[in-house]
Amino acid sequence: MREILDSAAAWVAEERQFALAVLVSAQASSPRELGAAMIVDADGVVFGNVSAGCVDGDVHDLCLQAIETGESTRVRYGISDETAFEAGLSCGGVIDVLVLPVLPGTPAATAIADLHTAILRREPCALGIVTAGAGRGALLLDRERERVDADLPATTDSGIRGALDADLARLRTDDHALTLRYGTDADPLEVLGVPFPHAPRLIIIGAVEFSVALSRLGAASGFEVTVCDPRDAFAAPARFPDAHEVVHEWPHDYLARTPIDARTAICVLTHDPRFDVPALTIALRSPAGYVGAMGSRRTHDDRARRLREAGVTDAETERLRSPIGLALGGRTPEETALSILAEIVMVRSGGRGEALRDATGPVHPALSTPDVPRSQPGVEEGIACAPTSGIILPR
């Protein structure tokens, strides 16, 4: 959903009428993840998609209808559904798409504008989209700095409101959308929780040509890119137009003061021992989710020796991805950058890096359901099933 937010926020600012379509449920094979979104304005202008193109034409028409009627609608597409067949869904899965109008001055328009502002501030937040039950089509924004009241009917149980607030707050720093269910079978409330954690960081040490390519690919993939090199002549901002910032500072000094968390990838692309060992010493002891260094196997062995001499333990050195990147066979800066970024994605996602045609099972394996504390009442097999507590379904 993040990919359509810039355009959606601009349309809100222009007070343009449009509709938002969101993929809210997927069974079996689906080309897009939960929360994938499309926006369509009254003139038919479109950004984004909720499938690989197979049902987007039909959803486009539903968006135009939603703008006219001002009503939300939820539609299911499946391989056995004649409508889905006509729309072109051929992947064998079943998907549900929620279409809701976003009209000037409505709570939905306000929620989108506030969400966009929070993301620009790097403020973790979560968007709850009511997909079934009372208030279907409402957008509920939970922000770290400011809690926005849920736009739910006044008759909604206070316990459900509290559970929803707590679940959305926990979801802010997650990576995947979750389906949350509340209430009873006779009176259910279903909400798709879409997390918007701050953008992952990519810190590139060394202003070399490989860094130029990695900065460009990293920014295009949604990373907030920083290039760090103390040499002004090489670390010129004009060389790195896609970087969030270019820092003229010794890398180890910068790493010691900048925020680093599990969503941070650090790539040391210089062979200068004045840079790499001090920087890697800090990086390997940080909570960074990925630390890689460029160089041949001989360079790696020499670097590992110098790291040990600097006091880095074998366990810390084991975290180092070196030689950096996956073995794609490319040699140009762009091809090398692609191999590095591919390895970062693999590490973040827990992938194996093998060719899909040589693997078995689903293309996108189902993610595990988060553990629920066993001390909660009504908890069984990892599912919270008390009447007013959220049920977190497999992602």
Image (cartoon, rainbow, N blue to C red):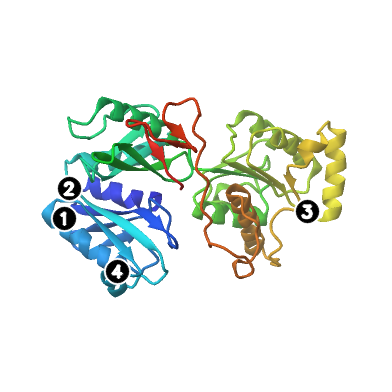
Element type at mark 1: helix
Q: Residue furthest left?
A: 69
Q: Which secondary structure, mark 2?
A: loop
Q: Is 15 drawn above or below residue 391 in the view shown?
A: below
Q: Name the residue carrying label 2.
A: 103
**CA distance separating discs 2 and 3:** 54 Å
In the rendered image, residue 215, in percent from the top left (x then y), is placed at 58, 52
Find residue 395 and report its horizontal and vertical position in percent: 46, 48
Q: CA distance from mark 1 to mark 3?
A: 56 Å
Q: Which mark is residue 81?
A: 4
Image location (x, y in percent) of residue 153: 18, 34
- Badge 3: residue crowd in 10 Å (few <14, some 14–19, many ≥20): some
Camera-nearest label, 3 or 4: 4
Q: Which residue is mark 1?
A: 67
Residue that appears at 55% across and 52% down:
218
Which one is nearer the viewer's eye here, 154 or 196?
154
Dot 2 amino acid type: Leu
